[in-house]
Amino acid sequence: MSRAGIVLVGLGETALTAHLPALLRHPAVRVAGLVDPIDRRRVLAQERVRAPAFGDVTPFLDDPSVDGFILATPPWVTPALLDRLVRSGRCVLTGQVLATTSRAARPLSALPTEFRSRVQTGLAYRHDPALAVLRDWITRGKLGESLLVRVHVYGELRDRADPKHTERIEAALVHGMPVLHEGSHVFDWLSYLFDGGPRTVEDTWAFPTRSGLAQPNVCGARLVYPKGTVVLAEFGWLASAFPHAELSVVGDRGHARLDTGSFVLDLITADGAERVEFEPDHRTRCFDLQLERFVELITGVRAEPTPDLADGLAALALSERIANLARGLMG
Ligand SMILES: NC(=O)c1ccc[n+]([C@@H]2O[C@H](COP(=O)([O-])OP(=O)(O)OC[C@H]3O[C@@H](n4cnc5c(N)ncnc54)[C@H](O)[C@@H]3O)[C@@H](O)[C@H]2O)c1
């Protein structure tokens, strides 16, 4: 069978450091095109792969050699692009944040089923096998019945040596607090681990660690999931140093700890300690597995996308709800 022709749209950090290497590693994929309005980004991508590049997706819409699109665009431009691309009849892999608000994502919710079934949401880290192991421990009661989850996702440090990075993250902050960007991943993991979303959002908070920021850069929430599982979630960007980022589950029988940077998983119970590690590194394996599932969707091996549009919209709605509640509390 001929290789699947995929166009990469949005040639920023994620595209060049994660999507493009995964595309080049996959034996059944051909990079059919590159799109970014910024000339420099197209040049950088073309240094890595020989493929036609344009500032807009239009030339690829009627190209019969294109089987799918990967969108690595900012969430504020994704909804309109996604709507346009999926209506061209191709499969689309999106970024993990579909939009900056559920309102902006509304046209996606209204997509007819035939189009929705071609959209895979880019919640890349859902594919990590460590998460399946943790889910198995939870489901089999290895940690106990009543569980407390602490999930701390801190990152995007303010690095004096990298002012461009700070500028990019401060610009993202204009469009939403860290929970809006990082929460999509976290709430997707939690709904996978606990078979559904939270029953209640008990409380929320937010504060800026410095003045002059567009929005608070640290925020959190306390949620109750099915079976009474309590989740304490914290998100933060743009300080010079932060606590370690991890997801830990504590119960009567033990403690499991997932390092959310490496996805190394540790378990401590009365029977002893156990460590679970997978190869290659977390980001590489997740983007490879994500792409593999996307190729299966394109070729018809997989009937339904995983995660699907509904998963992405649910994660966005919860992240947005927490951001809005936290902002309200600030007065
Ligand atoms: N799946 C993941 O784990 C993961 C991780 C990080 C980021 N992301 C997602 O990837 C996306 C990009 O993030 P990033 O950090 O690479 O951002 P970035 O700002 O580095 O890159 C975005 C690129 O999109 C381009 N762009 C803007 N409008 C466009 C348009 N209309 N058509 C084509 N290109 C356009 C920009 O010029 C820029 O080069 C976001 O949706 C982000 O949420 C996903």
Image (tube, rainbow, N blue to C red):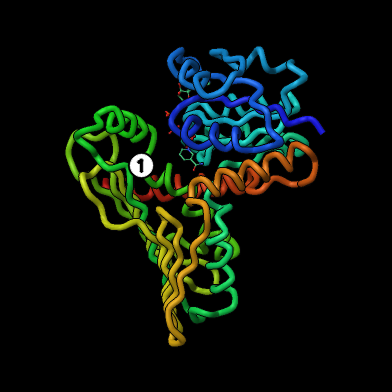
In this rendering, is residue 251 above or below 205? below
**Identity of the residue drawn at 46% across and 75% down:** 274
Quadrant location of residue 210? top left
- The extreme left residue here reads 211
Q: In this view, does 1 lie to the left or right of 149?
A: right
Left of 1 or right of it: where is 159? left
**Residue named by callout 1:** 177
Residue 275: name its quadrant. Answer: bottom left
Residue 322 placed where, x, y %?
Answer: 41, 50
Q: In this view, does 4 lie to the left or right of 217?
A: right
Residue depicted at x 59% and y 78%: 140
Q: Position of residue 66 (x, y in %)?
A: 72, 23
Residue 166 versus residue 304 in the image, above or below: above
Instruction: Please state which of residues 137 and 191 is positioned toward the viewer in this rendering.
Output: 137
Left or right, residue 229 beside residue 112: left
Residue at image coords 74%, 36%:
298
Q: Where's residue 267, x and y in %?
A: 45, 74
Q: In which quarter of the image is residue 239?
A: top left
Q: What element carries label 1?
A: loop
- Decide which of 94, 133 is in the foreground and name it: 133
Can the viewer see residue 96?
Answer: yes
Which residue is at 25% across, 48% downward? 207
Q: In this view, does 121 lie above or below 1?
A: below
Identified by mark 1, the residue type is Met
Residue positioned most to the bottom? 270
* Front-most of residues 115 and 152: 152
Q: Where is residue 147 in the image (x, y as percent from the top left)?
A: 46, 75
| Residue 202 visible in this rendered orientation of the protein | no
For the N terminus, the image quarter is top right
Q: In which quarter of the image is the C terminus?
A: top left
Q: Residues within 10 Å of mark 1 (few under 14, many from 20)?
A: many
